[in-house]
Image: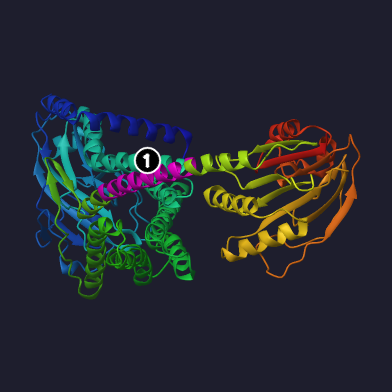
Amino acid sequence: MLSSRRSWKCAAALAWLLLLCLSPGLAAAQVAAATDGAGLGHSVHLRGPWLAAPGDNPRWASADYDDSKWTVLPPRVPLPASFGQARSLWFRLHLHVPPHTPSVALYVESLPFNYSVYVNGVNIGGQGEVDPDRATQLHPPVGFPVPPRLIDDAGGRLVVALHVSGGPIGFLGYSPMSEDTHLELVNPEEVPLRQSFRLAHDWGESLALLAFNLLVGLCGLVIWWSLREQREYLALAVWLLCNALSIVLNFWAHMAGATPGSPLALTLVLVMSFSSVAELEFMRLLLKRPQNTLWLSLEAIAFFVNFFIPLLETGRLPLHLAVSLVFIRPLITEIFVGLVLLRGALRGNRDAPLLLLPMALWSVSDVYGIVRTIVFFASDVLWPDLPKVHVFSYTVEFATVATTVALFSLILIILRRTIRLSRERADLAAEVAAAEELQLLLMARASRPTPGYQVSTEYRPMQQVGGDFFLVQPCEEDGSLVVIVGDVSGKGLQAAMRVSMILGVLQREVMGQPDRVLGKLNRALLAQGDLGFTTACCLRLEADGSFCFANAGHLNPYLDGDELASEGALPLGMAEETSYTVLCGRMDRGQRIVLLSDGVVEARSRKGEMFGFDRTRDLVRMDASAMADVAQRFGQEDDITVLTLSLA
């Protein structure tokens, strides 16, 4: 486990790196000023050509060793085929330094292997364990002081020798002395500034991608927070934020020299795995594909295949098998998803075309890398890299270009979808406002003057529009009063429209016995098709206090705190041949009947406690408004409707 001291060093280096990325010109000026100081007077670039040989022989570090028959390896060329799949290489370079030079350092940067450095046969430093059986590590730039006696004793003649290990997987045809590797003889005082500037230069591209991923990922997270039903924004946020975190962890591992099996390296692999799964999930949601066995299998493969990378780097799997397993992920996430995107674009998905170009670029990069590796294993011939983009002093990889194009495409997708969703929500808000106005109008008409009776109603929808309804209908012919309280299944606008339809049906029907009222409403709902179900309780009260009621799956009414039990019956809209039992009773003057919806009983506190039937019985002696207030303060989770009825 990395020590806290090393962690603080990595954090400080990252902060310094961010500062230098904002002002690379200043950093360059500082390096130039330091180069003009004492000592060498200027830096000496060790570009080669180097002399190289595969194998491991300690005598090759000696200044007197005859290396005239070694292979001359110019910079920017791959390893020759004669080197095969060597896992250990030696490089030698002859140079001359003015005698009596007071201080010189050998500065090494961008050498992604374990290595040891020798000057005139003396080991002056190195990074990592130079052992073909040990995994290579990531290393920051470093300067190794050259003892002055080595220069003086040899009269300024120096032989620099590097012993480089490729670890269990070897070099795969890549030369350690590539165009990205820099070795220089410099004044030791320059080393800290050169390290900072080189980190800013080498990681500037990654920091730009870090900022870009953070920006787009946070935008996706904010949009998902306001549009919870749009889960593709959550998948996008997880994907890009994991990408950003992997850049930070990769930099940390680079600065700390983390080995492939270290906790930091395994954390990086875990974050990459979550990123791969979130990418696939985003593509699936974007293309509106079902979460079937195929997609679950692909996501599982994409998650676990990343863990073969440390097994490959540490040599715990055969090389050919490990490389084949690692190649599974790009085949899934780029090629398969690219084909699915193409199919979606052909079927009219408006977002799919925006991701086709970056997916095609990713596919080209990954397929080329796969074929390149296969050719190398088969013939020891290494094909050249894909073209790179050069911007000032920066070299941008082909895959980075694809990633940048993808991020711009994702921004366009977010903008387009957000604008479209905003318009849809505005249209929906207008529809909800219209439905709310219509529902309020219908509810106002649902309660008419009731001479001879005292009726109190209270309606508290959970949202702008609700799924509860009530109706108070006096009969002028015999002086009776019919009331009904009900609740439709579902929420929102659809439930509100069904309430409007039900109230319209009830107001057109001639009021009669409760079982007939419920029967007519049941047939009307079935005639409208599959609208879900509706519970309702209908009660008819006569002027002398006698009453009868029928219940269709609703809460029973209460008479002075006592529940009026009824036989169970199916809710409305479920079966055509449904009968509703009529139960009768009598109330005296001063007594009160209460009908209510389940929003009272099912109110829930912040601790998750339900209001329940016992508390409801204690409330039914209150008026309608007071009952609704108590339930609402307890914790409203559904529409609340209360209707109280008594003789005047």
Query: Whole-percent x and y of residue 200?
Result: 24, 36
Is 72 left, or right, of 225 in this rendering?
left
Magenta segment range? 408-433
Displayed quadrant of residue 278? bottom left
- Pick the quarter of the image with the C terminus: top right
Query: Whole-percent x and y of residue 77?
Result: 12, 58
427 in magenta: yes
Residue drawn at (35%, 40%), measured in percent from left and top? 214
Residue drawn at (21%, 56%), measured in percent from left and top? 90
Displayed quadrant of residue 65? bottom left
Residue drawn at (14%, 26%), measured in percent from left and top? 29
Displayed quadrant of residue 534? bottom right
Q: Is residue 140 visible?
A: no
Q: Of residues 557 and 304, which is closer to you in this image?
A: 557
Q: Is residue 465 visible?
A: yes
Q: Of residues 469 and 118, which is closer to you in this image?
A: 469
Q: Residue placed farthest to the bottom in the image?
A: 378
Residue 427 position (above or below residue 103): below
Tell me the SS state at disc 1: helix
* Mark 1 neighbour class, 10 Å CA radius: few under 14, some 14 to 19, many 20 or more: some
Residue, disc 1: 219
Q: Of residues 378 and 160, which is closer to you in this image?
A: 378
Query: Whole-percent x and y of residue 518?
Result: 72, 58
Q: Residue placed farthest to the front in the image?
A: 477
* Badge 1 amino acid: Cys
Q: How many numbered badges does the structure rendering display?
A: 1
348 in magenta: no
Query: Whole-percent x and y of residue 267?
Result: 46, 49
